[in-house]
Image (tube, rainbow, N blue to C red):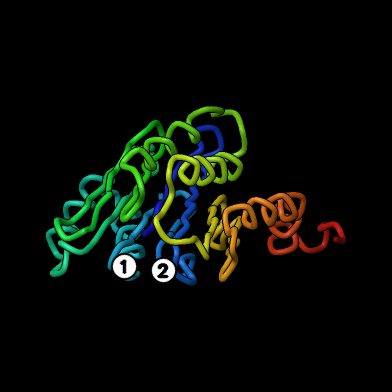
Amino acid sequence: MTFSLIGRCARTGMFGAVVTTSSIAVGSRCPFVRAGVGAALTQHRTDPRLGPLALDLLEKGFTAQEAMNAIVAATPHRDWRQLAMIDREGRTASFSGVRVKPEKNETHGRDCVALGNIVRSIEVPAAMVRAFEADPAAPLTSRLVAALQAGDTAGGEFKPLVSAALLVANRHSFPFVDLRVDQDGAPIAALARLWQEYAPMAEPYVARAVDPDSAQAL
């Protein structure tokens, strides 16, 4: 009942995650990003502890696959988990436990990996990857939103979606973008509108944090 994608911009080094589901507050449980390190997803019977653990391992120098192997080996309820991660080099890893419900799939692409569980078609993650890869020169955040829209067009979920989230890390310890939609009848469309409204303010908000003397008024 969730589909998602994490990706890296090879040009800027930014990392991002996008996710939607038919339950509330997906943004608080599933996506995790860290500037200069990577991104991770944890879903299905979600364990939010695994996201920060994945990023800690990546920060220590583990590759995405090495970190995934370590987490899967140490997780007692691995059969319920669906996980993905991407490291600073754009390498990806994913895992779907045997108790993750169908339709389920994992698709890897250039600088990205997508997951889906309890979706209408196993093609949902592949459609997300194709959309993400379609325009590598576009801003990472726009590519992530396009991926989520493509997953929905490819079949999406059986139940109505109600929440969606977009999370991006750039140069600092705080998120460059952290947008969430909850209890909305069309959360992907709402998320896309939020990003369009937030886009002109993203860099100025960073400037307010790191150089408030020269930051522009909003």
Residue wearing tag 2:
29
Q: Which quadrant of the figure contains the C terminus? A: bottom right
Residue 104, how many percent across, how many down? 27, 49
**144 shown above or below 118:** above
Q: Residue at x 40, y 63 (%)?
A: 30
Q: Residue at x 28, y 45 (%)?
A: 105
Instruction: Give me the C-alpha separation between circle 1 and circle 2.
Output: 7 Å
Q: Is residue 126 visible?
A: yes
Tell me the kind of residue under disc 1: Thr
**145 shown above or below 32:** above
- Left or right: residue 8 compared with residue 89: right
Mark 1 and 2 residues: CB-CB less than 8 Å, in contact? yes
- Left or right: residue 36 compared with residue 182: left
- Left or right: residue 132 compared with residue 186: left
Q: Residues within 10 Å of mark 2 (few under 14, many from 20)?
A: some
User: Element under label 2?
Assistant: loop
Tell me the kind of residue under disc 2: Arg
Give whichever of 94, 203 is nearer the camera.
94
Q: Residue at x 42, y 61 (%)?
A: 159
Residue wearing tag 1:
46
- Quadrant assignment, res 80: bottom left
Give whichever of 156, 182 is nearer the camera.
156
Residue 18, how many percent across, how many down? 49, 52
User: Element under label 1?
Assistant: loop
